[in-house]
Image (tube, coloured by chain):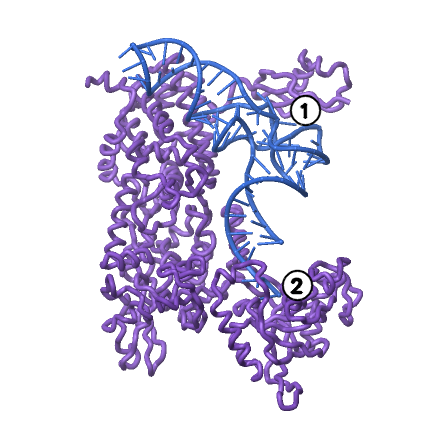
Chain colours: A purple, B blue
Amino acid sequence: MTEHEARSATSYDVAAVQEKWLPVWEALNPFQAADDGARERRYALTMFPYPSGDLHMGHAEVTALHDVIARYWWQRGYDVLNPIGWDSFGLPAENAAIQRDEHPATYTYANIETQAESFRRYGISFDWSRRLHTSDPEYYRWTQWLFLRFRERGLAYRKYSPVNWCPNDQTVLANEQVVDGMCERCGAEVTKRELSQWYFKVTDYAQRLLDDMEQLEGRWPERVLALQRNWIGRSVGAHVDFELRLHDPSTGSGQAAARALTVYTTRPDTVYGATFMVVAADAKLAGEICAPQQREAFEAYVEQVRKASDIERLATDRPKTGVDLGVTALNPLTGEQLPVWAADYVLADYGTGVIMAVPAHDQRDLDFAREFGLPVRRVVDTGEPNPEDTYVATSGDGTYVGSGDLDGLTDKAAGISRVVERLEAEGRGSAAVNFRLRDWLLSRQRFWGCPIPIVHCPACGEVPVPDDQLPVVLPDLRGADLKPKGTSPLAAAEDWVNVDCPACGGPAKRDSDTMDTFVDSSWYFLRYCSPHDTGAPFDVEAVRRWMPAEQYVGGVEHAILHLLYSRFFTKVLHDMGMVDFVEPFEALMNQGVVINHGKKMSKSLGNGVNLGEQLAEYGVDAVRLTLVFAGPPEDNIDWADLSPGGSLRFLQRAWRLSGDVASAPGTPPEGGDVALRRATHRCVHEAEQLLESHRFNVVVARVMELVNVTRKAVDSGCGPGDPAVREAVETVAILLSLVAPYTAEEMWERLGHAPTVARAGWPEVDPALLVRDSVTAVVQVQGKLRARLEVGPDISEADLEATALADPHVQRALDGREVRKVIVRAPKLVNIVVG
RNA sequence: GCGCCCGUAGCCCAACGGCAGAGGCACAGGACUUAGGUUCCUGACAGUGUGAGUUCGAGUCUCACCGGGCGCACCA
C-alpha cells in the first residue's frame, strides 16, 4: 500500500490498532500517579470487582464512565490516582472449589488474571502499580489488625443471637445464602438458631452517620442519601417503665416483681389508651417473665415462631399470632393492670423488644386485639369513626379524651412533651431516640474469608492474636474439606484450630469464623494510597495526601451496606487519629444497569449480551463509546436500543479526518478559518461544562457535531490545508481520548504527534472565539414568537427594544394595541406585553 | 402502607424559566458502485402523559391525577 492509499483509506483495522498501541502504552506507563506534589492531586475511585469469571457488560459500562472522569483529570493536568484491585474473598470461589475439588484460591486468582487482562485490553487508565487483592495475606493481615483495634475500642464484640440455620446441611447460612426462605445449597426450609457471633457496634455511630450526610448533600445522589437515612431510621419517642407483676397462682393475686418492663414508643401521649403489652416472642425476656401455668403454651409458640420460614414472615396481611404470658404490668400513669403477651409481630432487636399496645391508634395492635378479644380504647378523637367499632386505627392529630390532664388538648407535640415531663418527674420514663440500624453481624461460617484473629482459651477466655503474629493465615483446605458438616470448615481443620493460648500458653482454639467480605471492602480505598506498606494498613501521610476521594463510581446496589460500612470505618479511623476526615467519598456517581430488550440480562432469560463478542465485533472503542453515548450515566441503558455499529462508523469518520489534514504539525491555528475555529473552541468550552456535570452522552454528541462541521470545512469550505482544520482535528483526538483511546491515539499519530494523546493536555479555550459577531434575538408579543433580529452581541437593552418595536412583523402583531410592558434580555430576547 | 425517580419524534436522547431538536439509531430519496456494502448529500416525523397554578413567558417551578420504574416495609 502506498502512503497515499493509506492516507485516503476509508477505514482502519480495529484489531490491528489495538494490538499496536497496547505495548506502546505499557512502555510509556502514562497513568501512574506521580504523588510528587508537582500537580494538584485527584483520586478517582471505582468500586473494585469481585472475580467471578471474565468481565461483563456491567464492568464495561462502569469503567468506561469512570475512565471519562479519570482521563479528563489527566488532560486537565491533575496528578490522578486511579487504582484497581479485587474484592477476592467470597462464597462463589468456595462453591467452585467444592465442585472442582480444588482450593478457592485457584478459581479466584485465575479469574483475577482473566479480568486484569481484559481491563488492560479495555484501555482503562488504571495505575497498575497499586493493584491489591483482599484475599492476599499482605492485605488481610491489616483487616485483622483493624478488627483488633476496633475490639480494643469496644466496637467489636460477641453475643448470642439468632441466625439462619439449615437443618439439613447442619450449617449456618448468611442472609444471601437464603433464597426465598430456602437453603441455597439443598433447598431445605431455613430456620433460626441461637449462636455466638461477632458484631461491629455500628449503632454507636448512628447519629454521626446521619449528621455527616449533610456534607454529601448535592454531591451524592439524593436517592442514596434517602436510602441511608431510611436504613438508619432515626425516630424520636420515649422509654416508659411499666412495673411488672408476676402472677401468684396460689392466691390468684399479682405480686410486684423486681423488674420493670421498659417499652420504647413514639407516641407516649397515647399511654392512657394502652390496653395490653407485647414482648417479642424470641426475646430472652419473654421466657424469663412467663408464668408457670403458661410455660407450656409459650414454649410451643416459640417453637412455632422459630420454624416460621421467611416466606411466611414476609407475607403481608399475615394473621397476628401470640400467647398470653400470664403476667401483668402496671400502667405508670393510670395504675391499670395490663396483660402481657408474647408475639412475633414485635421485634426483639428493635427498641427494647417490648411495646405498650394502643390498639385504637396503631393498626398492628388493633389487629392483635381483635384476634384475641383484647379491649380497644380511643384516647385521641380525630373526628374519624371510632376504631373501637371500625377496626381501623387512627393515627392522626385530634383531641385527647380519657387521658387525664391531657383531655381537651389538640396538639400532638404538646401532648407528647407533657407526658414525657410527667414520666421523667416520677422517674418512670424519659425521652429517647431510637434507630432502626442494627449492629453489623460480621461472623461467617465460611472458609474463604478473613480469619478472625481471636483465640478462645478455657483459662483466659477471648484472647486477641498479638499483632506480631498476624496475619492468621488460612490453612490449606480444598474440595471436600470445605463441605459443610455441622461446624465451619475451619473448625474441622484440627492442626490449624488447636493452638497455644497467646496469654497463658495453655491449649486453646482459634476462632473458626471468618469475616463478612464487606469488612474487606470497607477500607481498600485507604490501602490504595500506600498498597505496599508492610508496617501499617496504610500510610497516614499518603492518605492525607489523597483522601478523601474526589469521585467514587459504582453501582447503586451498594447504596446502603458497602457505603455505610465504609463511612463507619472512616469515622472510627478518624476517632483513632489515623485519618483527618470523616467522610471517605466526596462525590458519588451511580451508573445505571445495562439491560437487554427491556429486561435484566440473565442466563435463564437467555438475553445476555457477551462483552467479549461485542469487543471482537466492534472493537474496544466502539463498545466504550456506545456505553458512554447511550444516555445519562445514571440511567439504565437497553443494549437493544444501541448501535455499536453506528459508534464504529462515527469513529471511522473521525479517524478519516486525521488523514485529510494537510498542514504541518505545529502549524499555529491563528489566521485559520474563523467559523471552524469558533466551532472548535465552543465545543471544548461546552465539553468542559458537560464533563464537570457528568453529562458524558452530550459530550459525545458535541464531538460528533465538531466532526460534522470539520468534514464540511474540508470538503466544501476552507479546505484541508487551513490551519483551523488541524486545530479542529487535534481537538477531536483529544476529546475522543476520554472515550475511545485507541482511535484517538491512531489519529494523534497520523497528525504527526508522538504518543500519548491521553497526556497531550486539554485544549485552551480562547474566549475571543466564544463571542459571535451577531446573535439572533427573538421578539415575542404576549410570549409568542413574532420576529427574529440579527443584532450585535453587545447591543444595549434600549437599542434592542427600539429595534424590536420598529420591526414590521412586530408592529403587525401589536395591531395598534397599547404596549404595557417590555421585557428585554439583551441580546437574546424581547417580550412585549400589550394591554 | 411509607419514601424516591422518570414520562419530549417510530426508538435512544438534547434543550442557564426565553426560537421545542444538539447528536445518534431506524426509515425514505439521491450521488458513487456491475451489485451489495462503505462513503457523501438530502428529507420527513413530536408541541413535551393529563389538568390546574405561579410567571411577561413553563418541557423546565408548584400542586393534583394518569402511566412506568425502584427502594424499604409488623421498626412500635
Q: Quadrant of the N terminus of chain A?
A: top left
Q: Mark 1 falls on what kind of element?
A: loop
Q: Which residue is mark 2?
A: A362
Of callouts 1 and 2, which one flags the residue occurring earlier in the amino acid sequence?
2
- Residue A449 lies left or right of residue A285; in this view the side is left
**Which residue is at the far bottom?**
A250
Dot 2: within a 10 Å radius of its alpha carbon, few (fewer than 14), some, or many (20 or more) residues?
some
Q: Quadrant of the C terminus of chain A?
A: top right
Q: Mark 2 falls on what kind of element?
A: loop
Label 2 sits on what residue type?
Asp
Q: Which residue is mark 1?
A: A783
Which one is in front in this view, the residue at disc 1 or the one at disc 2? 2
Task: Provide residue A819's location: percent of width, then percent of height.
Answer: 75, 20
The reply to whether residue A41 is visible in this rendering is no
Q: Quadrant location of residue A38?
A: top left
Task: Provide residue A385's location: percent of width, then percent of height.
Answer: 76, 59
Task: Provide residue A249's location: percent of width, then percent of height.
Answer: 62, 88
Residue at horizontal 32 percent and vertical 70 percent from the top:
A487
Label 1 sits on what residue type?
Gly
**Which residue is at the far right?**
A408
Marks 1/2: CA distance? 54 Å
Depth check: give the residue in front, A485 or A670.
Answer: A485
Residue at horizontal 45 percent and vertical 45 percent from the top:
A590
